[in-house]
Image (cartoon, grey):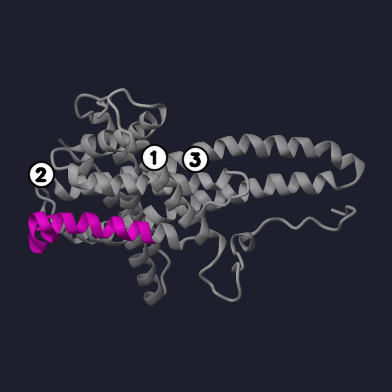
Amino acid sequence: MNVASGGFQPPSSADFVFSPFIGQSAYLTKPIALIFLSVLVISVFFFVAARKAAIVPSRLQFAGESVYAFVRNGLGRDIIGQDFARFVPFLFTLFTFILVNNIFGIVPFLQFPAMSRFGFPLVLALLTFVVFHAAAIKKKGFGPYLKEIMFMPGIPKFVYVILTPLELMTFFITRPVTLAVRLFANMFAGHLLLLVFILGGDHLLHGVIGLKFISPFAFAVGIALTFFEFLVQVLQAYIFTLLTALYIAGALADEH
Amino acid sequence: MSQNGSPETDPQDAGDGAAWSIVSYLLSGLIFWGGAGWLLDHWLGTKIFLLVGLVLGAAASLYLIWLRYGRQ
């Protein structure tokens, strides 16, 4: 392509690396600022929503309670069952934290999903990993729990040679890894996709006259994808929490 | 407290969730037995064990998924 302002610089993984706000400190970057902002937003929202709790809820209180009821009933009670109450705070924090950070990806001026930096989803997945194993070990004891993972009842003995390594690998490696990678990859790819169409549209707009006419189409696709991204962002927050609830449910379930 | 959730535990929910958690089983099977096959190939200088491993791993994963979620 040979347009007026030189070649188009396609967005790349370099667009996910931010230089620190002040000096050389690697800690004060945009993703980290967004993480803190999300904590602030969530805290203030639910504090204000719950402050004047009334029988006839205000609109804000209703919104807050709806989110809470969704996680408590839909993810906690329906999936974990009986003993769900003590896991609700964890699930609720996880869901709102991921949700708000993902949506930051399409909020004007913020426009970056922190979960597209792998460190954040990795830590969340490790938290889930610790929680569901700890719940199981506390309930069943380490030995019996490990035995339950490794030896599924009701299959011939020699099959264990093939299945036991898979069970161990699934519980201790692939579960946390897929959890982290799924969230990271969705946010990374989504952000990159938006960058391609918005930056591309902008580049076409500054190109020769023929290209200017194509530019609105790029922007239109960019806007459509922004709505699509919203769906993905909500869905990924839901799936992360859903799988956490499922793993906890599996950890607490009695041997079949 | 708003009580607007579904009344009973819906088996459909567990089904949806199972679909998502199946991915980690499939990956385990392919990576572990596929990896074992690749290593064998590497040591013996053959080319067949990677394929055997991948097929075995996929079959074992599907069997395991059926054991976990299908049988009841």
Rendering quarter of residue A222:
top right
* Place of residue A63 in the rendered image (x, y in percent of width and height, measured from the top left): 39, 31
Range of residues picked out in magenta: A123-148
Is the stretch drawn in magenta largely helix, strand or loop? helix
Is residue B40 positioned above or below A116 on the image? Answer: below
Rendering quarter of residue A50:
top left
In the picture of the structure, the residue carrying the numbered disc 3 is A232
In the picture of the structure, the residue carrying the numbered disc 1 is A48
Q: Determine if the magenta segment contains residue A131.
A: yes
Q: For the residues carrying marks 1 and 2, which lies nearer the camera in this image?
A: 1
In the picture of the structure, the residue carrying the numbered disc 2 is A256
* Place of residue B20 in the rendered image (x, y in percent of width and height, measured from the top left): 35, 43
Establish whether labels 1 and 2 are both on one chain: yes
Q: Determine if the magenta segment contains residue A126.
A: yes
The crowd level at tag 2 (other Cα within 10 Å; few <14, some 14-19, many 20+) is few
Lower sequence index among marks 3 and 2 = 3
Q: Secondary structure at mark 3?
A: helix
* Place of residue A22 in the rendered image (x, y in percent of width and height, measured from the top left): 60, 71
Q: Quadrant of the C terminus of chain A?
A: top left
The front one of A191 and A111 is: A111
